[in-house]
Amino acid sequence: MNINNKKWLKLTLLTAATATIAAGCKDDHFDVNEDVIGTKTIWQNIQSNPALSEYADILQSVYYSQTEEKTTTETYADFLNGEQTLTVWAPTNGGFNYAYYKGLLNTGIRDSIYKVEKELVRNNMTRYTHILNGTDSVKLDLFNDKAAWLNFDKSTLQGQKITEANIASSNGVLHITSGAATYQPNLYEYLASRSDLDSINAFIKGFQKTEFNEYASTQGPTINGQVTWVDSITYISNNYTNLFMRAFINHEDSNYVMIAPTNTAWNTMLEKTKSYYHFKQEYNQTVHTQTEQNNDTIFESKTSFTQEELDSMLNLYSKNAICQNLVFNANWQYERVPITSIEDIRALDARKDSLKSTTSKKFKTKGTLNETNRDNVVEVENFAEMFGNADPVETSNGYAYVVDEWKLPSTVYAPIIDLSANGSTFEYSDNQCVVSESRRSYVRSYVVNQLTNDTLWSDSIYRYDYLEMNASSPTAHPGAYFKLQNVLSGKYDIFAVIGYNTEERKQNRFRAYLYYDTEKGRITKDSEATLKNPEEDAVDATGASLKGGNFFVNKVPRFIVEDGKLKNVEYTDTVCLARDFEFPISYYGLDNAYPTLYLKSNFQSSAKDKYSRNIWVNAIILKPKE
């Protein structure tokens, strides 16, 4: 210890002790140690006190760890006999479960030994000096990074009574307590504390690594040009929780709520999610383009995997589908509504509120969505069921709702794929098509109510982003190809959101083709890729049925009138292209392999007064089917 720091500590302790004696206040029942100048180390003060013999035995038996996996040759007795400035709250004999911790040490198992270090030894000490003086309270960072309240007025640390305070030591301060401060795990640690949470814990901990904290560590001398460290401080980092879940559940300064599926719930779900990630060893992607002579053509792009890579992808993606959206931050909820009890969550159900996970997945109650909702929103029957309908376990940084049965909606692990037709979704236009991106606005249209002949006003502005498929000539029928990325192996209903052509005031009549992979190869022929109209009520511009045919037609605008007033005008039509269409192969996470949807204008010249050749595509939507 620096000599100036020693002098400062002695002076501070002496001043505190003198003030305590003179004041004769609530702190005057503490015996002021004669050794206020601190000639003994913290360890020497512990060792010389018979009432601390059990704790002293633990300190001599536990070796100081640099990381969770790596120990030193220095025991905590050695550590507390050194020069680092520390404060220790030592529990008296009988103030902690001595036999339990000795039993853990005697196992010789690293995890058990580290448990003693983390939950008992480091949980009752901190860096720097903390003297009990006055009536305030202060929140301390303990040596294991936990937070603890030191209550000056009540003379307690985390509720444990300090029976002898401010024992000055040459390397800090010693307080004697009636019992050890209770260790409270955070969410990250809580997963490891229960055997019935082994599955989710093993998956998350597989991404754990130990990081060196240079700024919190004590630098030693430079030897042969290399910096040495007197004390190396490390912290646990996990790229999965930080990047995939976007939840720092191992940080003490957070306030999270987590749904924690037991092994029973996890294994049941894993059987489901694995079916969505059926990859193949080689994908031969057909990419549509043009030759120099302006003729449509294709080239193949190959993506291949080893069996080891396929196994790794299946393991990661199937487990991530279960795990990724299980954490919520109370501070992110609507109007900062708490969700720290099941009653809080039932109140959200009663109000038909919404919840948002740390990945920004928004959960809304049933009946609040429509066909064109984006893929980060899911419908839920009942929030309380989702959280297990029971109160949670409190941890040091939030609350764990342990569930034996998975009640989250299926769109959490098999999400709706809602792709804007603009940007990266568009792949290529054929040689009869010229594409452009646009934003269409519809403002204050005159609308006549056919029943009453009254004129209604549309006083709202409707905006839609479109990919415009424009005909390259007056007789051309434009076509465009769209990339359907991240499609899972499973069944979907497939939709195209088509905008009504308000410039020509006409509908569209078009065909749809879907090119995709099978186990044997890729469907590339139009004859095999043609989609049939599945809808009973699908009709053309004359009212003739399109059910089962090769054509699709979008509807004219629909005017929504309530109480004689125009409430809304729907200019887009979500056209169903396929029901229960099954993709045998998964494309999740693949950039260069995907199904391709081809939309192509198609009608006879005699019908040109009814249909526009130019198609305005707003979005492509795939809704998964269980």
Image (cartoon, rainbow, N blue to C red):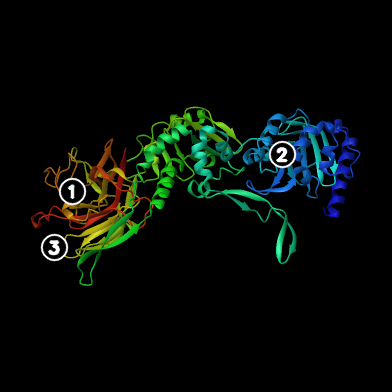
Observer-nearest residue: 262 or 477? 262
Report the residue at 66% width, 34% height from top. Answer: 104
Per the image, the residue denoted by label 3 is 475
Q: Position of residue 33 (x, y in %)?
A: 89, 37
Per the image, the residue denoted by label 2 is 121
Per the image, the residue denoted by label 1 is 552
Left or right of 291 in this view: 358:
right
| Marks 2 and 3 in Cβ contact (< 8 Å) | no
Asked if residue 450 is positioned above or below residue 72 in the image, the reply reads above
- Mark 2 lies on a secondary structure that is helix
- Mark 3 lies on a secondary structure that is loop
Report the residue at 78% width, 37% height from top. Answer: 56
Q: Position of residue 74 (x, y in %)?
A: 74, 47
Q: Earlier in the sequence, mark 2 or mark 3?
A: 2
- Three-letter residue code for mark 1: Phe
Please say whether residue 523 is visible from this viewpoint: yes
Q: Residues within 10 Å of mark 1 (few under 14, many from 20)?
A: many
Q: Disc 3 vs disc 1: which is toward the camera?
A: 1
Left or right of 203 in this view: 600:
left
Q: Earlier in the sequence, mark 3 or mark 1?
A: 3
Alpha carbon of mark 3 to alpha carbon of mark 1: how far? 20 Å
Q: Disc 1 vs disc 2: which is toward the camera?
A: 2
Observer-nearest residue: 131 or 393? 393
Q: Residues within 10 Å of mark 3 (few under 14, many from 20)?
A: few
- Mark 1 lies on a secondary structure that is strand
- Three-letter residue code for mark 2: Val
Q: Earlier in the sequence, mark 1 or mark 2?
A: 2
Tell me the quarter of the image containing the C terminus.
Answer: top left
Q: Which mark is residue 405?
A: none
